[in-house]
Amino acid sequence: MDDSTIIDLFFERSENALLETKKKYSGLIISIAMRILGNKPDAEECENDTYMGAWNTIPPQKPSNLTAFLARIARNQAMKKYEFINAAKRNPRAIVSLDELGDCISDEGDSIRYSDGVLAEAINSFLSELKEENRRVFMLRYWYFADISEICKRCGISKSKAESMLFRTRKKLKKFLEERGL
């Protein structure tokens, strides 16, 4: 079933919307949650929370890209669950990925700028300017918290190429954000 039909089912408040969403997107949602949580039962709970989140937000929202919409909900649900479960511990994959990006984002400046979505819009704009391969590698590393070996396997590139692409992309992102005062 195509995404627009699934969204229509959500707008009709049909429970088939959830069934069709699960059929089509269960694998994606579970894989996102597993990368963050590393635990199948927690990932399955996150999957259910993702469907509930979609049910509660469609309508009024009508996502233009259901895949990205559900991936965002799944990631947010998994991060919340992770923080709840591991309040004192840290996910080394997530920490390494976020530490790498930390050098790109200045601590200087008004934190209000970051909270109002300006930073998110700038990063989205930056990503839209990247070549598809660079964008994919960047998203796998910093959105999905994939490790370098997984990125290499999924993109068919060597470890040195992946590391080099990430380094150069972070450098470009830093320059991009500095030019915009972020």
Image (cartoon, rainbow, N blue to C red):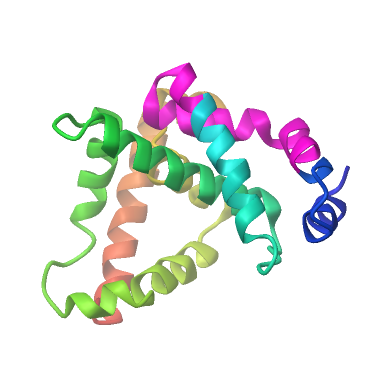
| On-image quarter of the N terminus | top right
Main SS of the magenta part reads helix
Q: Which residue is drawn at 56% across and 46% down?
A: 71
**Is 77 included in the stretch rendered in magenta?**
no
**Residue at coordinates 77% horizontally, 55% vertically from top-left?**
10
Q: Position of residue 176 (x, y in %)?
A: 33, 72
In the depicted structure, whether residue 66 falls above or below residue 15: below
Q: How many marks?
A: 0
Residue 169 lies in what quarter of the image? bottom left
Residue 155 shows up from this direction:
no
Residue 177 appears in the picture as rendered: yes
Residue range (magenta):
18-43
Which residue is the extreme one toward the top?
Answer: 40
User: Looking at the picture, does residue 153 appear above or below residue 25?
Assistant: above
Q: Nearer the viewer, residue 138 or 167?
A: 138
> Residue 180 at x, y = what percent?
30, 81
- Please state which of residues 155 and 119 is positioned toward the viewer in this rendering: 119
Instruction: Check the image and report above or below for 147 versus 114.
Output: above
155 shown above or below 133: above
Position in image of residue 132 (x %, y %): 58, 52
Give the quarter of the figure containing the C terminus: bottom left
Q: Quadrant of residue 163?
A: top left
In front of the other: 113 or 173: 113
Question: In percent of the image, x 38 and y 74: which residue is there?
Answer: 117
Indicate left or right for 62 with 51 as reference. Answer: right
